[in-house]
Amino acid sequence: MIPPMVRRVLVLAAAFATALTPVICLGESSKPLPAKATRELPVELLSLLEQKKMPKYSPIVVRLFKEEAELEVWKQDASDRFQILKTYPICRWSGDLGPKLHEGDRQAPEGFYAITPELMNPNSNFYLAINLGYPNSFDKANKRNGSFLMIHGDCWSSGCYAMTDEQISEIYSLARDSLSGRPSFQVQAYPFRLTPANLARHRNSPNLAFWKMLKIGNDHFEATRLEPRVDVCNGRYVFNAQPPPNSPSPLVFNPAEKCPPFVVNPEIARRALEKSRADELEYSRLLEDNVPAAPIYSGLDGGMNKAFLTQFPGRVTLAKVMPYASYLPQLPPIPWIDNDGSLTRRWFGSSLDKQPECNPPRVGFPSGRC
């Protein structure tokens, strides 16, 4: 029989050994997490969580807006509704407004994505990374392809949403904590904030129908502050679908097949419909006023929040005409020059006069993709 004192020592030794066991990283089974992936949230952010009555491990929703170059983190508060926690300026996104269609088009994805623990990369070459899981079931149903589309650090992008290392450290920690005991969190990626004014400006875009479909999910979220359930059928997104009353079987969605009969929770549908109708009236008024329409093709390879223009000069360049923009020759000329000089120069400074940097080891891509 083991004496009580020896037993106590053995128990303490076992507990100490357990505390020293390396934490296993998200999405992997053997590699220990690097310190950057286990870092606690900054004191200021923890204080903000307390102020907004948001439990540290409650769910999050991440929202991305290309044109505004902003990433929003929303978090569930004590009332189980989502509220805005923090807005981060996006350091770099590539491509143009519109969804990603195929590998190599440099487009950052648009749509609704579920981030599981396996998509969290603590060992990324871009500091830390969150894989969007592109292509999702909607993308696959529409024969879109691509890989390794992420939210990551290092402020470099080839189809990704790139943040600074400091930003991605916070975002990664918020995502990691929200996955505690949950299978996933949602990312909503948009071309811009889907307001009537923005949709009216982009009314000539061939992506307008796609963006209006995304707006349904956007309206469900903004009207209720609840994460919308997302399904795909008939090659389309469907939001907050549930079986009709007295339905004998659960809903089954096949992304490429006809949608089954479904209904939407009446309270969610009512709030979303009220918002949609108000937005449609404003959209119609703007069209009647003939508000100026934005160019379909910007001529730029992505964008950068103005907060970073002086810090990272030369990282937004003139885009090559890629197959995605094959309709460009049919467009009217883009007014690059006006009375004040070069429009590009006024937006991005003299840095565009320089050749863009192409340092494959730094960028992390083969030289042929620079």
Image (cartoon, rainbow, N blue to C red):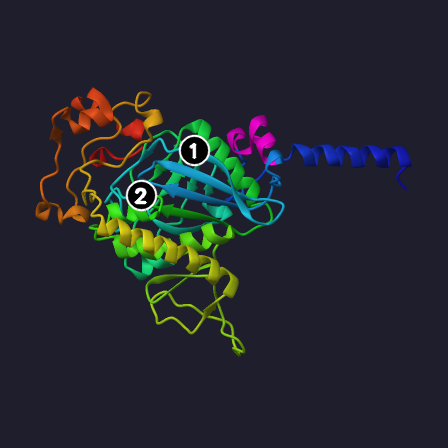
Measured along the vertical axis of the image, is residue 162 above or below residue 252? above
Q: Secondary structure at mark 2?
A: loop
Q: Is residue 18 left or right of residue 28?
A: right
Magenta part, dominant SS = helix
Residue drawn at x 54%, y 52% is 183
Residue 15: x and y in percent read: 74, 36
User: In the image, what residue type sits under mark 1?
Assistant: Tyr
User: In the image, what residue type sits under mark 2?
Assistant: Ala
Q: Secondary structure at mark 1?
A: strand
Q: Give the residue at mark 1.
A: 88
Q: Give the residue at mark 2.
A: 108
Q: Which is nearer the N-term, disc 2 or disc 1?
A: 1
Q: Is residue 141 left or right of residue 73?
A: left
Q: Nearer the viewer, mark 2 or mark 1?
A: 1
- The image quadrant that residue 64 belongs to is top left
Residue 59: x and y in percent read: 55, 46
The reply to whether the magenta stretch includes residue 239 is no
User: Which contiguous range is marked in magenta?
Assistant: 34-49
Q: Quadrant of the N terminus?
A: top right
Q: Residues within 10 Å of mark 1 (few under 14, many from 20)?
A: some
Residue drawn at x 28%, y 54% is 284
Residue drawn at x 34%, y 70% is 257
